[in-house]
Image (cartoon, grey):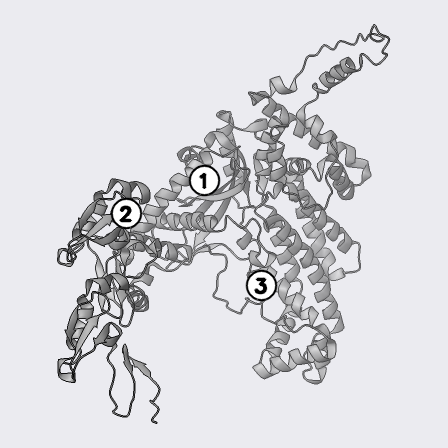
Amino acid sequence: MEIDAPMEVQNGIIECESRHRKKRSVAWEHFEKLPALNKEVGKAKCKHCDMVLTATPRSGTSHLRRHVERCQKRLVLDIKPISMEAGFCQLEYCNDIRRSISKVWYEFEKFRTENYNEQKAQCKHCKMILSAAAKNGTSHLKRHLDKCPKRVTSAGDVRRYLPTTATEKVAEGSSLVQIYQLNTNELHRNISRCIIEGAHPFSLVEERGFRCMMSKACPYFKPFSQSIVRRELFSMYLEERDNVKEMLTKALGRVCLTTNYWKGRDTKDEYICIAAQFIDSHWKLHRRILCCRALVPPYDGISVADDVACLLSNWSIEHKIFSITLDDTSYNESMVSSLESSLYTKKVLLSEGSFFQVHCFAQVITVIAHSTLKLIDNVLDKARDLIKFVNRSPSQRKKFLELAERKFQLQARRRLYLDRPLRWNSTYKLLDHVLYYKNVFMHLEEWDHNLLTEEEWQELSIVHKFLKMLYDVTCMILGTKFPSANLYLKGVLMIHCRMLEITRGSHTFLTDMIKEMQLKFDQYWSRNNLILVCAAILDPRYKVKFVEYCYMKLYGSSYVGEHVSKVVDALYCLFAEYKQHATLASSRLVGSSRADTNFSSGSEDGDVFGDYNQFLSVTSRSQRNKTELDIYLEEPSYDLNSDLDVLEFWSKSAKRYPELSAMACDVLSIPASTVTSKSAFNIGSKTLSQSSMMPETVQALICLQDWLCTQSDSGDPTIKGEDLGCSSEDAGDDDEYDDNSPTEWF
């Protein structure tokens, strides 16, 4: 007995090796051989339509295959369902019969009439019956779907699934036929947005590599020039500018401004960058750049004030300005003075402009950090040499980390990288990691004698501790998208107490510098403490008691009452203006000044407590004479270290304190710094890499990038400390890199 060899499947043909080496055609899966007297008169019957054909060895099976391809019942059985998620743009490709099946058949149902050879199709929506003969095609079915009223009502206009000018491409060996129409305008818009958000050069779209990549990803992509990107830039800028204007119009309270000055790296032009910070109707804090305008020489405060006033008028926020936060640029004082006079004349400022000007807190911290690092320049150079020694080769680095793990039980995940001189936080990270491996470095004396002395290690440790405090304060103030004005007082106290600790200690190399910085810090504090201390009182964790505690630390117990009284009086004066402008609060808060205090001795039936309800009514009326601010200050404070969203607190308290919540909305929207979180640690000058671009292009780029990136980050309310600047893992030694530039378009 002979055993047939195993079957193999190739190209849809089932091959069976017998002793005669004959191959069995796949057509026999669809036919059944009929009994015959001899091989010369063999017949085969179709399993689908029962048609009988010749099946002799001499005739072969080609005619059987042709019948299978056009057998109507065979076609109906081979239709497989296709997901409608992709719309009508896809067709099913049947490997067995090599024919495309139109997706309109998922909107029609085939059936045969009494005449077996006539096919009909019934619309699944309106039940209309149309011809379904193969010779008529499916165009009339598509036209019916275009105008089928029930189809349009139930699933939308079908024409969006049936492109009129479609291109068809069948991948070799694929079971899908993809039909689509390339939306060129949408593609240009998305590529331009990618370039703007990533700060890539406009010439990217003209590079050979980019065009090659796009041609592979999209065979119908047509290359375009950078002029298209510039056109899309201004188109998107105008659209987003209208959206920002609408946000400012619908802002819950007033708008607070910040100013920054930049210089062009190539053209040496000066730019003023103005941003607005405000709280929307959902009590969410927003910051948007309004302009980055090139200044016209001569650069003086009056001309800058005119530019700012023109900007406020164009954005229709002239009557909504609350404060402006700025740095110590030479002509800022004259600019603010001129702008304040203009706004005061129009009677749009509160408290006669006494709270209008706020100075940048981050700039003070940066100056202190920079002055501290300059004292240990020589020691820092030695620390950098240690890092270069470890990173001299991969084997040297591996040997160092293995030693740290094996002998000193340290985690070798901390890598040693050089810092960026223009970012003091990267230098702080360098010190942090070098001190972490201090014992390992001291163990390396047998390898290299150019190491730090014990005194130098102590200096690094002292400076590191001081920089850590400055780093923590900066992260506390700028490492969040929540308000920063209420955290200002806490940060000031942390810096002040640390400075006092150093001046009273034995760290002589820091004493002189700290005393000089203390004078500048006190001068800054005296110009800013009033309105930002009021912001701390409006935080339910702090209130007046925390202000008293801070003033006692700053000035001593003798002057606490005088300074606290000044702050509280300023707060009440500001609240009086909000109360005066309120339209609905008077009826809710002000009660009758007369109270009926004639209580009866009891009811007629001898109940001595019968007048208790009357007493409660009089007591509640007397409470109404208190203002919202009185009631808020009398309530117990929250825990000092509790994790509280202050805007959420005032959002929930808006009905209870309508006037006070309006004031809190404006005061808490004051930014304590002019810089963003990514520029908080910059030491060098601020430059723009705008090359030869026109000033209006620079403005559109910077504003649009800020608006688009803000939309992308809107879901993340907090920023990690490492995200404020480069972490030590990312820091490298690149002197030409300018991390102060918000753009890198060339």
> Please, what secondary structure does the residue beneath circle 2 have?
loop
CA distance for labels 3 and 2: 62 Å
Please state if 9 lies on the left or on the right of 409 as rendered: left
Report whether 295 appears left or right of 340: left
- Residue 138, position as x, y percentages in the image: 18, 54
Query: Residue at the spot x=72%, y=52% of the render?
Result: 515
| Dot 3 or dot 2, earlier in sequence | 2
Label 1 neighbour load within 10 Å: few <14, some 14-19, many 20+: many
With 642 as the anchor, is 686 left or right in this view?
left
Q: Which residue is mark 3?
A: 727
- Residue 618 falls in which quadrant of the image? top right
Left or right of 89? Residue 634 is right
Residue 124: assigned label = 2
Horizontal and vertical percent position of residue 209: 32, 69
Q: Nearer the viewer, mark 1 or mark 3?
A: 3
Q: Is residue 224 visible?
A: no
Residue 611 occupies quadrant:
top right
**Which residue type does callout 1 highlight?**
Val
Mark 1: which secondary structure? helix
Q: Amino acid at mark 3?
A: Ser
Is residue 530 positioned above or below 215 on the image? Answer: above
- Residue 304 numbered mark, or none: 1
Residue at figure coordinates x 33%, y 62% from the top left: 204
Q: Is residue 111 above or below residue 290?
A: below
Q: Looking at the image, which is closer to me, 591 or 277? A: 591
Of marks 3 and 2, the one in the foreground: 2
Q: Nearer the viewer, residue 328 or 86?
A: 86
Mark 2 and mark 1 residues within 8 Å of each other at the beta carbon: no
